[in-house]
């Protein structure tokens, strides 16, 4: 395959949900369905490609971040895939979460619309930059994923596993949202890691 025939990278975000501290630190994983086209059956962190609506999500502490859509994507994907509503600035009513999630999965509404409807308040600062990962060259669909870390206590599917404490990088290592000028740093250019594609 020549370079011009290579699939284009799609901007995406992955969220590493963690809970506990020290030896009790746990990371949340999901097993990708065998029915999906991209990396079926892989163990993965929740994540996926950026959607047009992601740029509409409001953050209390960062109205004009160039990476706003990536952060919103990480929060949306965590909610869609696990039922975890991460990055909250204030507590929310738990009883309405599963119904809201089902409506989102059925494409009856968007994540920003649910935010407005339920009064959810998010903090961009609740997502710490944790790295960057690109799908390997053998993948027919390519993703350029920004990886975020968020603390969580709740889950609805998947499993928690014990792991050593994760290294974090400066929040300035977040990359710009699609269409925005990109900021590169040494931390944001790493391509290793243990997560699989969104």
Image: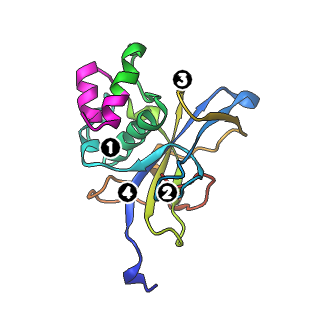
Q: What stretch is highlighted in magenta?
A: 101-121
Q: Name the residue under label 1.
A: 68
Which of the two discs, 1 and 2, labels the residue nearer the N terminus? 1
Query: How far across and down, in percent of the image, does residue 187 sit?
Result: 53, 56
Mark 2–mark 4 distance (CA, rounded to whole Å): 14 Å
Mark 3–mark 4 distance (CA, rounded to whole Å): 27 Å
Q: Mark 2 points at which residue?
A: 188
Which of the two discs, 1 and 4, labels the residue nearer the N terminus? 4
Which of the two discs, 2 and 4, labels the residue nearer the N terminus? 4
Q: Which of 177 and 95 is in front in this view?
A: 95
Q: Kindly check if marks 1 and 4 are in contact, taking CB atoms under 8 A apart as contact.
A: no
Q: Kindly check if marks 3 and 4 are in contact, taking CB atoms under 8 A apart as contact.
A: no
Image vertical order of residue 148 relative to residue 118, above or below: below
Mark 2–mark 3 distance (CA, rounded to whole Å): 29 Å
- Closer to the eye: label 1 or 4: 4
Q: How crowded is mark 4: few (under 14 residues within 10 Å), some or many (20 or more)?
A: many
Mark 1–mark 3 distance (CA, rounded to whole Å): 24 Å
Mark 1–mark 2 distance (CA, rounded to whole Å): 16 Å
Q: Is mark 1 on a helix, strand or loop?
A: helix
Is residue 26 part of the magenta span, yes or no? Answer: no
Q: How many marks?
A: 4
Q: Image check: 136 left or right of 77?
A: right
Query: How far across and down, in percent of the image, does residue 155 sit?
Result: 54, 27
Q: Which mark is residue 11?
A: 4
Mark 1–mark 4 distance (CA, rounded to whole Å): 12 Å
Q: Name the residue under label 3.
A: 154
């Amino acid at each position: 395959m020549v370079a011009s025939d290579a699939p284009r990278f799609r901007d995406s975000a992955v969220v590493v949900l963690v809970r506990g501290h020290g030896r009790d630190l746990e990371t949340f994983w999901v097993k990708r369905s065998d029915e999906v086209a991209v990396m079926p059956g892989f163990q993965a962190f929740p994540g996926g490609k950026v959607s047009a609506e992601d740029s509409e999500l409001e953050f209390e502490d960062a109205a004009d971040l160039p990476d706003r859509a990536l952060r919103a994507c990480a929060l949306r994907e965590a909610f869609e895939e696990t039922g975890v509503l991460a990055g909250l600035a204030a507590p929310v009513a738990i009883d309405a979460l599963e119904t809201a999630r089902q409506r989102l999965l059925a494409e009856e509404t968007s994540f920003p619309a649910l935010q407005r409807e339920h009064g959810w308040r998010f903090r961009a600062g609740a997502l710490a930059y944790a790295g960057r990962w690109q799908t390997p060259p053998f993948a027919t669909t390519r993703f350029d994923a920004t990886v975020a870390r968020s603390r969580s206590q709740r889950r609805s599917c998947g499993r928690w596993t014990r792991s050593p404490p994760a290294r974090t990088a400066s929040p300035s290592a977040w990359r710009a949202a699609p269409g925005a000028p990109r900021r590169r740093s040494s931390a944001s250019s790493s391509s290793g890691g243990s997560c699989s594609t969104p």
